[in-house]
Image (cartoon, grey):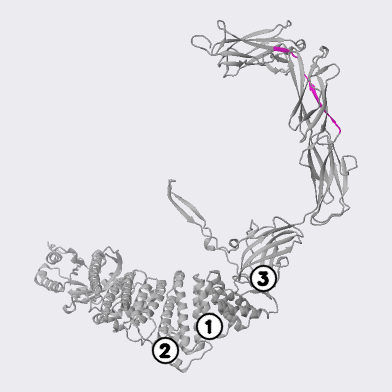
Amino acid sequence: MGTFILDTLFEVCLQLVSEEQLALVSKKGPIFCIPPIVIGLTFGGTIVGIDGAFICGVIGMIVGAGELEVFTAIEDSLLQFLPKDSAEWKRSLGRPVRSVHIGANFTPFSSAGLPKGTQWDLIRQPLFHIYWTECNDVDVYKSTLKEDIELWLKELTSKDIQDWLIVVVENYDGKRSNKLLPRTTVLDKIRADFAPKQGDRCISVINPGKSDTTDSWKGLVNRIRHLLLVAYAKAVSRLEDHVRQQRERRNDSGWKFMDYFHLQEELAQVLEMLGLYDEALVQYDELDALFSQFVVNGVTCESVAWLHDFQAPLERWHALKLRPSHLPKNPSILELRVYLYAKQAHMLLLIDKVWQMASRCLPFLHTCTRELSILDITSPPGALECWLFLASMEVLQTCDKYNHADEVEAYSKHTAPLWAYASQKLKALGELCGLLPGSSPTSEQLHVVVGLSAGMGDNPGTPIAPSPTDKLKEALCSQDAFNKLYLELAELAMGTYKHTGRVRSARLVGKEVAAFYMLLGETQKAAAFLCDASRLFRQDGWHEVAAQTERELANCYKQAKDWRKFIRCCAHVSSSIDLDTLIRWTYFDEMRKQIDKLDKSLVVPFCDIIKITSVTVKNRGTIMQDSDIELECTVESNFPREILCSRVLVSLENEPAKRTDKYCKDRCLTEKDLRPPDGLLKRLKIQSHLDYKQDKQLSSVSVICKLGELKRKDSSPPVYSDFGKCVEAVKLPFLLTPGMNFMRLTTKASQTGKYHLGQMAIHIGQMQLVSLPLIPRLSIEVEDEGPSLRLYKNAAPLLAGIEQTMNVILTVGSYPIDSTLRIRLNASRGLAIQIHQDAPLTNSCEFEVGHQEVFSSTSRRLRVLADMMSKEEHQVTIICPWNPKPIVVGLSFTPPLTSTWKLYTVMQRKFVQICVKGQCQTDVIVENSNLIVGSDREVVSRNNEHIGIIQNGLTYTYLWELTINPKSKGSTVNAEFNITYRIKKFVMEPKLYQYFFDIVDYETLYILDAALEPAKGNEFCRVGFLCHLNLTIRNVGDKFERDPKTKSIMYEVLAEQSVWAVCGRTAGVISFDAALEPQPIVLDIMPLTSGYLSLPRIRISKYIPAEGNSGKNETHPRLEPFSSGQVYNASKGKQVHVIVTTNDGCSL
């Protein structure tokens, strides 16, 4: 950037300084001053820092008066020290404070050089005045100096100049002096006479330039710097107000744009000199917008008079110069526009915004073109294209010269359209001048070239870096140079577009390059560009643009006589619904004509030619080997006419061990399933984010979206399936009509395995239209069904003890089996089987398979008989030759009858009850019941001897009284119950049913009795009154003498708490001696409710006290229950009448 400033600053300064300033500079010495720290230009312009000591500044013109020989001694030091430090420029209207570096140029005072009231040339007029004096004597001051200062201030006041400074220089030699110091100094007198309220307008400096007086010198430099900046601030503020007033008068009749232009440009130049480049850019932008508004209003409203000055015909179209230049006195609209844009670009370069300069270029060029059209400015043919090309190239060349590595990405987004724009304008010039490939310029076109070259002017560059004008002139003079330049610009445009990610724009430029290559006859290069463009346009959904590109590509292949690719393009063009029907018919007929000439097959992707809307597998579940696989497909044809298809196939691919693709759960793929996924509709990975402070308090809550993983798109060609295994259309040839087409496909499932549907192929002659893989995948499983043997029973449960039949079903699967194979059946213990009808039942049997057809079933009857006394669960093991493992079949047999017994006691008499329950679905007929208890005991039947019928789930009861021999008391009774039965449904001989059980502890040992009596004084038992419960326990058994455990018993009263309340003890222990006397027990009990109440339940148990001498170490007594036949409760079933208590004591 420093190089650019140094190159252009000299021209700026020459434009801005006046003749007097130049004369003064020439007297002072060389233009370039080299102070110790700063190297810069020191006359009426911008001070440019080279080593970074300061950034920018302004040279103010300071007028010196008084004793100039005093100033001459310190002038060089002031010129050096003023721009070193920055000063803060405070502005009004709330604008920010800016830091600027300020320098100065000194000139002698002259009354003629004072500015006039209407003079707005701030750069060339003096703004600050300094009076220098070395007078230190008060008397001399009063006699001569005071009057001189008064005259000087009157001159300034007459011109309304308020920015001045009086400097008193005091030089001391450092020697002691015997003179007394005066009470009042010259500085005090001057301050009192001329600046009583402005003390900062008077200052003294002691021994300037000496090291021991640096503070005094710094004070002088800072005071001059500050007051000079204040003077500039006032002047700039007055100029801004004046510019604002002139802008508001823009609709007046005498107002002229160029006068206002020079005025606001002066303000912009002042801001530029102050280093405020961004604010200077705003001034130029306002001028640009104001002029554009006038031009636009000239179309819709009455145009202003001064606008006609810009409607002269276009005679010059010189290249755009992005460096300070002079604006002609009567500029054309193009020259004014170029000057404005050059100024804007200059400001942008100074603030290091190269990319913004590039971004403004294309709108600037469009604005110029539009304004030339609005103002009806005539120009020679091609003149405007020449200027637009040169302007674009000049901006691009400047961007390339002043770019930075970190800004390439920023300005490349704006230079790419400029490269494309320049290539378009160059191509337009080529068409105008006959320079395109395949054409030669005529004499008239040569005259056009000469005129265009003359209008461009001369802007020579270097042999290494020719200027845009040189390049354009060379291109217009030579067709080879034209071709080279156009291809170079187009390649740069495409490369820059790709670099910035704008691939679509790059492909659009590629289409233009392809058309250029077609003119050159290089069809292969043209086809490459068109293929890339067509592929991208289809991916992005630009169907109409893609169709037009396909047309161009088809013409390219036709010109190259590449008929296979021509057929592919014709298929795409004829199926494009965005084109006219006549165009589609033309390419469709061309496709059919060339298909007939093909000598080998041609594979063409479906793309938008054929769309699969649904695919359905008609088979349900697993498909058996050698059965048919049936598919139903619906496709949509975009061909404009019907066409005959020789084959329609859908490939079957082996399913991989590890699934990677998405699989469909149903048996049908719909149009929604087959639609390609839209990346814009992909679900975003959004999650909440909580931000906490250091004290664990919640600071903020936000929602963040994780960036998706970038995946490289596969650019490899599609892999087509092997159609060796496929499903083919049933009816062939198939007539494919425009719109929806329904077709059925089938094949024989010859091999087992897991498959999924791959791709669909439609054969039209030698052309094969092949779809993409069908995703989600439709899975098909083909299995071979082997022979199977099953054992089936009837619906009714199997009964033990009865011979029944079952079915052995042999099913032959998808392949035949040997007829000589034998199948063996083995039964578990207690189960007899037989498959032959006449053979006896055995534990195992076998039979031969015999001749069986594929997918056939045969049934054989198996006789089974389960032993009545064996277990209910049995097993039949089937051994098949084709199965390495035997087949185990579990069988459950249910006995037709089940029995339970129960012992009842009446005092010392015993009764045995046997309940027989039917478990057969049909009725069971029973008779001849009998109970056998041994020879030393007898039973007396209490049953009616007749035939009984027991239904399923019902119970038949038998009762016998057991007479006990006193000699056999205490022993176990082994009882056997038997009865004959037969099933009513079956024709069978009666069978014997036996039931064995043992009767133990059946002797009655105790008889328990209880009675409830009212308390004394009461006649009845009443609610809430105590009653006496009299218990009597009597020992009647002989076991008492044999078993000492029965001598002590414990009784317990188990009363229901809502009915009885036992008062006092509820349990106790009693012992029986040898006399076996009954033991009476009296308990107090209170009824809680009225009515006929059952007596409380009483339970007695064996009480075994703790015996210390026993080997079991028992320290606590224990209880043992009696068997059900050992205790007879005589009070069981007794009730007592309890009446309600009344107030008068009478019962109701």
Q: Which mark is residue 762?
A: 3
Which amino acid is tagged 3?
A: Ile
Helix, strand or loop under label 3: strand
Task: Answer with left or right where residue 123 lies relative to residue 805.
Answer: left
Dot 3 or dot 2: first in sequence order is 2
Which amino acid is tagged 2?
A: Ser
Task: Answer with left or right where residue 589 lies relative to residue 978.
Answer: left
Position in image of residue 708 (x %, y %): 53, 60
Give the residue pinned by disc 1: 516
Name the one closer to the observer, 663 or 1130: 1130
Give the residue pinned by disc 2: 453
Inspect this view and state whether residue 193 appears: yes
Task: Answer with left or right where residue 415 lies relative to residue 1070.
Answer: left
Which image quadrant for residue 312? bottom left
Position in image of residue 47 (x %, y %): 31, 73
Position in image of residue 300 (x %, y %): 32, 77
Q: Residue at x 75, y 33 (%)?
A: 952
Which amino acid is tagged 1?
A: Phe
Dot 1 or dot 3: first in sequence order is 1
For marks 1 and 2, give the CA distance: 24 Å
Q: Which residues are magenta?
A: 989-1007
Q: Residue at x 36, y 88 (%)?
A: 315
Inspect this view and state whether residue 28 appears: no
Please say whether residue 150 is one of the residues in the magenta stretch. no
- Count of numbered badges drawn on the protein: 3
Badge 1, how many Cα within 10 Å: few under 14, some, many 20+?
A: many
Name the front one of labels 1 and 3. 3
Position in image of residue 414 (x %, y %): 44, 73
